[in-house]
Amino acid sequence: MSGRNVESRVVDAERPLTGVTYGPAGDADGYVLTLITANGPLEVEFNEEAMYLLWTEVRGTPWPDTPTPSESDLLVKRLVELANGADEEMLRAAIRALGGER
């Protein structure tokens, strides 16, 4: 990548399961890919066509040397899955249960 004006960041190793997320853009059309890096979050916006191309490109791509996930990794993954299907009250209750109430 030398010679080009490219910003390079490394996803935070302490947050491997939440280091990369995507979803609808909150204040614009399209989607946002968020990378949680050691230097803070980095958001990349995609229009619908570009997000679909990215999604179809990575979907089903095998992971090289898949590591065996730890029990903690599996629990975090399950928690995220449940959070994605929860309503607001369930999310508030979960945050309280985890000691994150403000």
Image (tube, grey):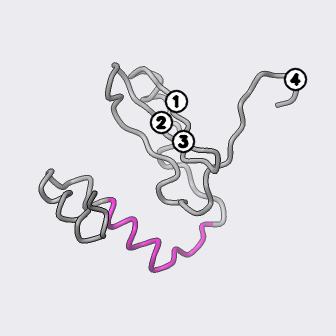
Mark 1, residue position? 44
Judged from this view, the residue extending furthest toward the front is 102
Label 2 close to label 3 by CB (< 8 Å): no
Question: Marks 1 and 4: in contact by CB < 8 Å?
Answer: no
Position of residue 16 in the picture relative to residue 80 (left or right): right
Circle nearer the N terminus (1, 2): 2
**Type of amino acid under label 3:** Pro
- Left or right of residue 51: residue 26: left
Please provide the residue range marked out in magenta: 66-80
Q: Residue 38: x percent and y percent?
A: 64, 51
Amino acid of disc 4: Gly
Mark 4 or mark 3, which has the lower sequence index?
4
Q: Are marks 4 and 3 in contact (CB under 8 Å)?
A: no
Distance in Å between CA atoms under marks 1 and 3: 10 Å
* Quadrant in the rendering for residue 31: top left
Contact check, label 1 and label 2, Cβ < 8 Å: yes
Q: In this figure, which residue is indicated by the disc labeled 2?
A: 33
**Residue picked out by circle 4:** 3
Question: Left or right: 29 with respect to 54?
Answer: left
Residue 14: where, in percent of width, then height? 58, 63
- Residue 64 spot, x, y in % from top left: 65, 60
> At x 52% / y 52%, what residue is drawn?
19
* Callout 2 amino acid: Leu
Q: Which mark is residue 41?
A: 3
**Looking at the rendering, in which quadrant would you find the C terminus?**
bottom left
